[in-house]
Image (tube, rainbow, N blue to C red):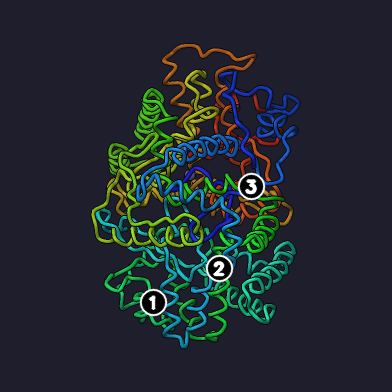
Amino acid sequence: MKRFLVLTTLLASNLIVLPLSSAAQKQSPPEVHGIAVEHMDPSVKPGDNFYLYANGNWIRHTVIPPDRAAVNVFSRLSDLSNQRTHDVIEEIAKSNPPAGSSLRKVADLYNSYLDESAIESKGLTPLKSHLDAIAAIHDKRELAFALGKTLRADVDALNNTNFHTQNLFGLWVAPGFHDSDHYTAYLLQGGLALPDREYYLSESEHMKALRDKYQTHVANMMKLAGFSDPEARATRIIELEHAIAATHRSLAENEDIHKADNPWARAELAQNAPGLDWDEYFRGAGLGDVASYIVWQPEAFKGESALVASTPLETWKDWLAFHLVEAYASFLPKSFAEARFAFFGKELSGAQQERPRWQRGVFIVNAQLGDVVGKSYAQKYFSPEAKAQAQDMVARLIANYRKRIEALPWMNPSTKAEAEAKLSTLYVGVGYPETWQDYSNYEVKPDDIFGNMWRGNLSRYEREIARLGKNVNRKEWSMTPQTVNAVNLPLQNALNFPAAILQPPFYDPKAPLAVNYGAIGSVMGHEISHTFDTEGSTFDAKGGLRNWWTPEDLKHFDAATAALAAQYSTYKPFPDLSVNGEQTLAEDIADLAGISAAYDGFHAALDGKQPPMQDSFTGDQQFFIAFGQNWGSKTREQALRQQVLTDPHAPAQYRAETVRNVDAWYSAFDVKPGETLYLPPGERVVIW
Ligand SMILES: [Zn+2]
């Protein structure tokens, strides 16, 4: 499960996530092939604040651009990837590709977003037929059909860990928990425009103030869309969302697979979750003949369905209209796009201005036609040599996991054999996929960005539901090559390392082993660890949901991971907000296991040779500093608060500081009792 990080956040329509952020500076490759000594703060003791020791000077001299919520290594590399993707798109557009071809779709989609005057001149026309359809809903039966029509494949519980949809519910099509050879329908809770239930339910002053601003925002959007009495409508919409939020599971609960394993036959939805007319809902969704679902959060389905019955029809119609306008505001005239940014950008993330339009256009193409540009991107920017070297590194790390697991004194042979089977069948994708997505069901028109987005979201949904019941392709990717990230796909027992993360500063073929293992090696180790973390350990070698642990082994594992959760829960990025160590546990395990495996991999790769010094830094010091420099970041307060509440990953500083659990870090920097990060050997958490 799980990507390596969540790239900033929720300026979202239905499916598209527009990261908040700036003018990509063209970057030149680093001249020094090693750690960035100039980013460090030598006045800080590594044992007191390792994060600042590795990144302090960079943090001091970095200013967050006004169109960004955060800057970090990932965003700098994303800028480079976006610039390159932009160049690929421009080349495609210049080549004047034939009508109907996927290349033509790229050019037309991109240009339709850039053409602001066409968007302005259309005004509200693109919305009209959709708003009219909502206005024409006469009763709860028609409401159920309309709600069904909003269902999209816009959530992803285990791969990209996206539990948020503004629609009443979300669909995820993935291998079945109990039949990993076939694609199955998972239904997830939804219905909130704000990022998480906490935004409605938290009693903190910060959240109360945000809710007041949200009220104004909702009223403003309803007014722009031409509704009378926008304030009263906004009040009712938010009351309904508040009631929905109260039925929702928290993110930490969402990540508990055992609570999610609820196979319901079609008829059971009406029995278990009465209120919504489910026949009409599924007819609207085009899922009339699907016999069963896995319902991720039964109590939310029960609660939300009951709310459909108990809440007045007019409130639901306003809720539908508002969610439609909100989801597509970025593709409507400026007044809508600006109002949306003023709240979801400025208030929720802290960014002060929108990213340049061309960058947002790149995100849209990536989201709707990502594999078309991805194919050209991979050809242009990822050499066969880079691929071979990265594959070799992953193979070494897997070999080291194997050794670590074999050597675990507490694990029974039967559990070890299952773990070994998982490692030996793990599919590792490096750079780009072996087959590319087919977008032939997606119609793109010049000068129609609203329609292009609508049809793009719908065509993705239709592609996904067409796969239900079909054989699973375990080698299918869930990220594009131009994504700066990595991912573990537990139901496929597979990893993806896209081309865009396999470059400096993460991966530099000219850098010493210490630096590559500390930087990209720990990322690779992180993803491999997800194979065995709190969630991965519940899936077997074929991706089936099955407990393959002996009770004693599981007890040991749970005790070790509980200690790590407790450690992270002590971290407080703000006086009124702590890290939730349960919510971030799987990622924290992966970080710790990742750096441990990478450290072994580094020493194995040295093959007994002495690692070269860089300046005065030993090989081990370079290894840990390179790891710490993965995490150098500056984040606005609003965005960091949102991250703590909605992200399964801990803030960057604490991810860097997991080195305090690794014995070799203490000897590398001579860390002593009394220093802030010092843990006595018995309190260091060792999992693998
Ligand atoms: Zn992860």
Of the residues tagged 3 and 2, which is closer to the observer?
3
Residue at mark 3: 355
Q: Within 10 Å of the Cα at label 1, are there few (<14), some (14-19), or many (20+) other Cα atoms? A: many
Tags 1 and 3 in contact by the CB under 8 Å rule?
no
Question: N-terminal of the two: label 1 or label 3?
Answer: 1
Quarter residue 63 falls in: top right
Task: State left or right for residue 184 relative to residue 369.
Answer: left
Q: Secondary structure at mark 3?
A: loop
For residue 205, what is the image quadrant?
bottom right
Asked if disc 3 is less than 8 Å from ligand 1, the answer is: no
Mark 1 C-beta closer than 8 Å to ligand 1: no
User: For the residue marked with disc 2, what is the amino acid?
Assistant: Leu
- Position of the C terminus, as image quadrant, is top left
Q: Nearer the viewer, residue 225 or 168?
A: 225
Q: Residue at x 40, y 63 (%)?
A: 171
The residue under the point 28% across, 54% down is: 180
Per the rendering, the mark at residue 281 is 1
Q: Is disc 1 placed on a helix, strand or loop?
A: helix
Circle 2 residue: 192
What x and y, as percent, mark residue 443?
38, 57
